[in-house]
Image (cartoon, helix red, strand yellow):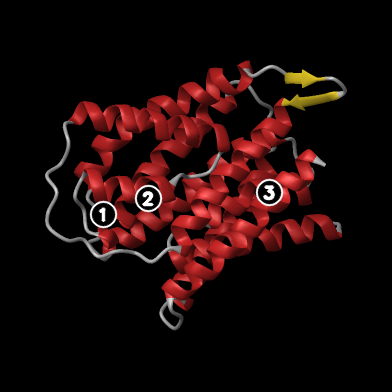
Amino acid sequence: MDSTQLLGYIGALIVGLVLGLIGGGGSILTVPLLVYLLGYNPVIATAYSLFVVGTSSMVGTYQKHKKGLVDFKTGLAFSFPSFIAVYLSRRYLVPGIPDTIFSFGDYALTKEMGIMIFFAIIMILASFSMIKKEKNNGSAIPPQPYYKTFIQGLIIGTVTGLIGAGGGFLYVPALVVWANLPMKKAVGTSLIIVTINSLIGFIGDVQTLEIEWLFLLSFTLISIVGIILGVFISKFISGKKLKKSFGFFVLIMAVYIIYKELK
């Protein structure tokens, strides 16, 4: 094992630790780690990320369920439009993006650059959701009609499919506002949606990409070990402070990705 691979596996452990400590966000490190440190193509990296995120979130769902913080009925209802969008985007949309999206003079925006820039924009949105203070739920909001949730699920699912991240930072506010779930239960319920979406999205990739199973399974296993460690450590550390600090880190990383891709 060379030093780059070793750093990659250390990164996998950190991804799991962050997921275990703050209940989300760690998955957003996976794509930059695979692209910039281990040298994978962004399309492959987003596919691998879906598997890592999906499997890790499955472990997280079990842990949250033991604490009574997963609403399976709401989670499964919300998953339906989302996983359709994730699967279709990984199976048809991503492979259908042209190698050169557009060119202007000597400058050309390639498919790989476009995916990473879009990923960075989503990272910026994620960082703001981590940095801002969480507001306590006030008066109860009646759940919206399901057709609206269906459309919103399709949109979030498409974004999730494109960037290869779990999308938990998108699903949590959606569950709070649209399904009227308390914040802690929304976090737990979002994990079941992320699990289903990510693994079904990855099935779309298996049909179009060559998968290095030995690497992917070992990377995922180390991330799961990180989650278990993170959940244990979270008993002794303030999750809110960690989440805010991680939000600033994600923001800096997003700016770096945009600089790296556009320079």
In the picture of the structure, the residue carrying the numbered disc 3 is 32
The residue singled out by tag 2 in the image is 191
Q: Residue furthest front?
A: 105
Earlier-in-chain disc, 3 versus 2:
3
Q: Earlier in the sequence, mark 1 or mark 2?
A: 1
**Split into 4 quadrants, where in the image is the N terminus?**
bottom right
Q: Nearer the viewer, residue 99 or 121?
A: 121
Residue at mark 1: 70
What amino acid type is highlighted by mark number 2? Leu
Quadrant for residue 194, please give it: top left
Residue 257 in view in this figure:
yes
Q: Is residue 72 left or right of residue 19?
A: left
- Specify the amino acid type for callout 3: Pro
Marks 1 and 3 sit apart, C-alpha to C-alpha, by 30 Å
Left or right for 138, reference 227: left
Question: Which amino acid, mark 1?
Answer: Val
